[in-house]
Structures are given as C-alpha cells and as structure tokens.
Image (cartoon, rainbow, N blue to C red):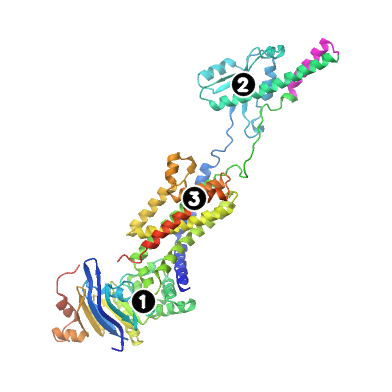
Amino acid sequence: MADDFVVVKDLHKSFKDFKAVNGVSFTIAKGEVFGLLGPNGAGKTTTIRMLSTVLEADSGDITIGGYSVKKNAEAVRTLIGVCPQELALYEDLSALDNMVFFGHMSGLEGKAAHDQAMKNLKLMGLEDRAKGKIAKYSGGMKRRINLAVALMGNPKLLFLDEPTVGIDPQSRNNIFENIKALQKQGLTVLYTTHYMEEADRLCQRVAVMDGGKIIAMDTPYNLKKKIGPPDKTTLEDVFLNLTGRSLRD
Amino acid sequence: MKNLKQAWYIALKDLKIFVQDRAALFFSIIFPFLFIILFNSLFSGVGWEDDRITLHVTTQEPEGGISYQIIAAIETKDEEALSPGDPIIIWDKDYEADHQAVLDGKLDGFLNFPASFTQSLMSGASTGLEIYADAGATNTRAALQGLSGAITSQINADVAIIKASAQLLAQSGASPEEIQTAVQQIQTDLFSGAAAAKSYLSFEVVKVGNVEAQNASNWVIPGYLVMFVFMAAATSAPEIVKERKNNTLERLFSTSVKRESILGGIYSGIAFKGLIQIIIFWVFGILVFHVNVGLSPLAIIILSLLMVIMSSAFAIMLATLANSIRGASSLAVITSLLLAPLGGCWWPGFLYPEWLQNISKITPHAWATDAFNKLMVFGADFGDVVPSIIALLVFAVIFSGIAVWKFRISDR
C-alpha cells in the first residue's frame, strides 16, 4: 500500500540451529499503532531488533519510510526511536542529562536538545524531577523516562518493546495517553506486550507470533470475532486459543 | 565530523558520570595520594640516610707517646660538628677490654698503636698500626684500614719533614743540642695542636649527571601513577559490560551512532579520566612532593600519556573478553593487583632478582616504571628510555587491536 510506512517481507533470522524468526511478513501504515503479540521466545524482540537496524536479518526485506534497512540503515536510523524492554538509561545521570545526551546522539544540538528534553519530560509528567538521578527514580518513572528518551530526535516510527512491564497503573495510563497523543500527531508505533488488554486498547491491528512465525494478524475486533462474540471475548482468549495453554519459559 | 561529535558527547557523558561519582573520584584521585603519603614516609631516607660508622682506637704506649697526641687529635669530641660521612672515632683506654670484646663478638674491630710506636718512629725503625677486626665486619675493617692508611701517610710525611729539618740545621752549622731542641719542637707542632687537629681522612663527592641525592617520591609517585592510572582504567571495564547488558550501547547504535563512534567515545572517556589523574599526580608531585623530573620532562610526558593510552585500550579489551559485570570487575582487580607489584610499582623493580625482572617485562607496568626510574632516579636522558616508549606503544597497539576486533554492542 502507498501509505505503508513499514514493509516487512519474509524475514528470517536464526541463532545457530534455533530459528528465532521464520518467514515473517507484515506492513504498518503511517500513523498506525501495530501490536506484535506472542509468548516468550516467539521472536518479537528479534523482529524489533532487525527492524531497528541493530541485528542483521539472514534473509528477507525490511523497508521503513521508503528506505531499505539493508541498504540504507543510516537513513532508517534517523526515522526511528527505540524504547527497549530493558531500562537502557544511565542511572548515575539525571533524567535531563540522559535526555539531552540521547538528543545529541539523535543529531540535536545544544539548546534544541535541552528544549526537547524538557518538552518530553513534561509529557511524561517528570519536569519537576528533571534533575533527579535515574537511580533514585521509581520503576514507573524509569519506564516513562525510557519512553521519553525514545522520543528524542522526533522519530517517525517508534518501537515500544514491552514498555509497561512492572509499573503502577498511573504510570501505565500516562504511557497509554502519550502513545495515543503521539499517534494523533502522525507517529507510527510498533508495540509489543504480554498484556492483551493494552493491545486491545491501543492497537489498530495486531499480529500474534509464535515459534518465529505470525500465526494471526488482524484488528483486535476481527480476531475476537473469529472465536466468539466480540463483546464477550477478550484478546487474551484469542491469544490462548492461538498459542495454547502450555507454559513458555 | 558527526562521528567525532558523537564520540565527544559519549566521552563527556562518561566524564560527567565519573566526576559526579564521589567514590570513583576518591579511589582514583584521593586514595592514590594517601598511598603515596604513606609509602613516601615509610621509604623516605631508606638507602641514603647518613648512617655513621663508629671506629674504636686504643694505644698500648705509655703516656706521653706520639700515639696519645695523634688519638687526641682524631678523637670525636662533638658529633654535631661532624660532616656527612665522617666516622665517629672513640678512644678506648683499655686495649685488653677491646681485644676481648672483638673475640666475644661484641665489637666489630678497633685500631691499636703498639707499645713501641714512638720509640720505633724516632729511631727510624719500622713500625706499624694494628687492626683487630671480626672476620665478618667487612665495613668496619675497611674503615679501620682507611683510617690507619691515612695516619701512616700523615706520619710518613711528618717524619720526612723532621728529617729534612734536621739535615738543614746540620748543614747550617747548628750544634747537636740545638738540632735536638728544634726537632722536639717540630715534633710537638706536627703531632699535636693546630697541625694535628686537621682531619686524617677526607673525601670528595664526584657528581655524575645532574641528579641530586634521592627523594623517595622520585620512585614512589611514578610507581603509584602507573598502578592507579592502570587500575582506574581497568575498573571502567565493568561499566562497559554494564552498558552492553542494559542495552544502552544498542540504543546508541539505533540512534545512528556508528560502532566506531561508540568505541571512540568510550575510549576517550577513559582516557580523559587518566589524563586528569596524571595531571594531578604530576602537579602535586612537583609542587608538594618536590619530585625531580630528571633531564627529560618530555620523556616523562610521553611515558605518562602512553600509560593513559595503553590503559584505556586495556580496559576496553578487558570488557570485550568478559561476559559479565562481575567477571569484568574480578579481572580488573586481579590484573591491577597482580601487574602492579610484578611491574615494580610497589617497590623499585631494579631490586628484584634478574629472573623476576625478566618475567616482569611481560607487563607494561615494568617498562613504564623502569623508564620513570631511569629518568628520575638515575639521571637518564630521552634516548635511554626509547625502548620503554616503544614497548608501551606495542602494548597499546596490541590491546587496541583486540579491543577494536572484539568490541560488541550487545551480548544477545
């Protein structure tokens, strides 16, 4: 489609004999929040790492904003922001210092980096704690800063890899509200989570991955409709129906 | 340009973390100086303190003999008035007691004037001074031999004066009585009073090069500079592993920062810390501890910079070899504490047996401390430490090569 901001075709990635991603294809429209769901080891994070240019695919094509990840990774990097599952922050620096630093890394200069850092801190409700060290922050605050850092440099595509793990409801709500607001401004989001209600609430479409493959992809409503009445069925029912009830460790 | 700027920001970020970390500052800057002050005070004076030797002298002559005049002239009357290196000379009145003391091992040795000393001297017969010394007391024996040699030379010269004076008097027609009186007068003047009061032993210090007597700081400070610059750099390795584990490096990479910029930034950050250390070390060393930088300050600067470069490369290499933060910490501490004493940072390497000195050459520490010692203690010039400079360069190239080759932004 002409509006597709992300196009992934037949993506493969193996680690020795383990096929982490096995023929994954999907597209994400500009301004869409796309959910990537799946149990542990399904291949979600590996897919995000390939899309965010830090991991090279064995085969397949990825195009972001019209640029091939393989051929023009540099251009792709200027379009993306990554909020990793881990708190990839400098705990000994203040929130503001972290933001400004990553702003500089994204190509922002002095005042522009500082101004955008303050704007993003305000967005996350942390402007009053701007000069506090990350090490002294609560888990929820750290998660919000983790997201705020990903927004430095005004990315067009945001990768959110389980951004709400282990945080309080208020922080989670703050993150949701911000994602919705950013989407309205035209930001495209690839969102992975284990919390099905989050995907249901945020995503226009979701893909369910298991064993390195996409086993279902549609709107949450349509996926729910496939297994029961959409108003009485949850996305979690869909997920368990598709991936089974056996434990994944 | 963009890559350099990003590397610069990464280095500044690491420097900011370092400066804000009080514990890191203490262990990198303050702690080394506590060590330096402690070891400086422990080692100050060792090897160059004025440890006077004591010499005992006796005579078996009856009172009134020339030996009485000589011993009275050379005997130490005021220790405070002695010059550096002068021995303390003690006149023991009891020959038998000293002799027994040497036999009992209570006294290292003594010089004795025999009972016939004056009589033999005046009659022109041969006589000699006697040295009694313990076989193992080589220093005392050598000093007594020196003292007896000096006395003998002086007496020979004095006897020649007396004989020449007597001949001159005889040639001028003086009577035997007049000659006898004149000889006695000359003898008294020579062996006592002002003439005899002059030192029988004298020495001259010949300086080689411009290096003065040593200040303990001249080897304590370079030793600890080498140790702590290396240690501070090495202990950065766990921080690099931590960044790899919590994905900040990967995050940097995804924000269009190239691997070379990340590597360069991390390297520069560690090097900046090392530069701060060496500047503080040398400024305090020169201003507070009065270290002598020797004949080639340029060599000192080059060696210090090479230590920083080599240590920074070592830290990154260590981080690439370690798979966990704890592993990197252990490796950093073990290598720092093993290489420092082996490389002569805790005490001078030139004191080691030859086989250990040869083994120590596998450490960059040994090359660095050896060069600093040569420059600051032994008065060497730039040319003398070129091999050490080359060796440190080789270490830096090897460590950098491994660091660049194995550096990774993620363990996943």
Q: Evaluate whether residue B270 shows in this view.
A: yes
Estimate the x, y position of residue B186 in percent, counting from the top left.
77, 19
Query: Label 2 amino acid?
Result: Val
* Magenta residues, start to end: B173-193
Q: Which image quadrant: the C terminus of chain B?
A: bottom left
Q: What's the residue at 56%, 22% (across, down)?
A: B109
Taking depth in this image into account, of B43 and B142 the one nearest to the observer is B142
Q: Which mark is residue A73?
A: 1
Q: Does residue B185 show up magenta in the picture?
A: yes
Query: Label 3 amino acid?
Result: Ala
Disc 2 marks which residue?
A: B57
Q: How many marks?
A: 3
Q: Going by the picture, which residue comes out furthest to the bottom?
A: A2
Spatial distance from mark 2 to mark 3, Cα to Cα? 50 Å
Query: Helix, strand, or loop for circle 1?
Result: helix
Query: Label 1 amino acid?
Result: Ala
Badge 3: residue crowd in 10 Å (few <14, some 14–19, many ≥20): many
Badge 2: residue crowd in 10 Å (few <14, some 14–19, many ≥20): many
Estimate the x, y position of residue B392 in percent, counting from the top left.
47, 53
Looking at the image, tell me whether mark 2 or mark 3 is earlier in sequence order: 2
Spatial distance from mark 1 to mark 3, Cα to Cα? 44 Å
